[in-house]
Image (cartoon, rainbow, N blue to C red):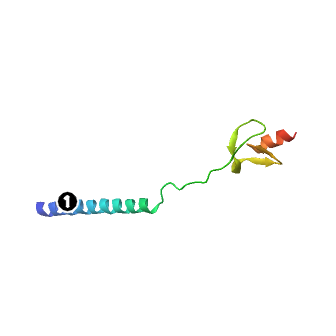
Amino acid sequence: MAKILLVIVIAGAVYYICRAYARAVARSQAERAVPRAQATPDEDMVQCCRCGVHLPRSEACVAGDAFFCSDEHRRLHGS
């Protein structure tokens, strides 16, 4: 009986080690598949005409030639 238990414990340990190794290999392959830091293009910064905060042009609200950090500041500037 003790020999059977010993074989079961050894088989379980081998199974656990093989699974851990397979996970490590899969993780390293996934990390290699994802490109490292992709260069993002530089973006112009604009200043809010109401409060003066600087923000990227793509996030700014535009009214004519003026840039605003929010719709509220755009509305307040027009009033």
- At x 69%, y 40%, the residue is 54
How many marks on residues? 1
In the picture provided, is 63 more to the left or to the right than 9?
right
- Residue type indicated by callout 1: Val
Image side of residue 40 versus residue 11, left or right: right
Counting from the top left corner in percent of width and height, residue 32 is at 42, 61
The quarter of the picture where residue 52 lies is: top right
Q: Is residue 52 above or below residue 3?
A: above
Instruction: Write the residue at 83% across / 42% down.
Output: 75
Q: Quadrant of the C terminus?
A: top right
Horizontal arrangement in the rendering, residue 69 relative to residue 2 (left or right): right
Front residue (pair 5, 42)? 42
Using a 10 Å C-alpha cutoff, classify the residue at mark 1 as few (fewer than 14 neighbours), some (14 to 19) or many (20 or more): few
x and y percentages locating residue 4 in the rendered image: 14, 64
Closer to the camera, 20 or 65?
65
- Say which element carries label 1: helix
> Which image quarter is the N terminus in?
bottom left
Q: Badge 1 is on which residue?
A: 9
- In the image, is residue 71 above or below residue 35? above
Q: Residue at x 37, y 63 (%)?
A: 26
Image position, residue 33 (x, y; %) = 45, 63
Q: Position of residue 74 (x, y in %)?
A: 80, 43
Measuring 68% from the left and 43% from the top, which residue is drawn there?
A: 55
Q: Residue furthest right?
A: 79
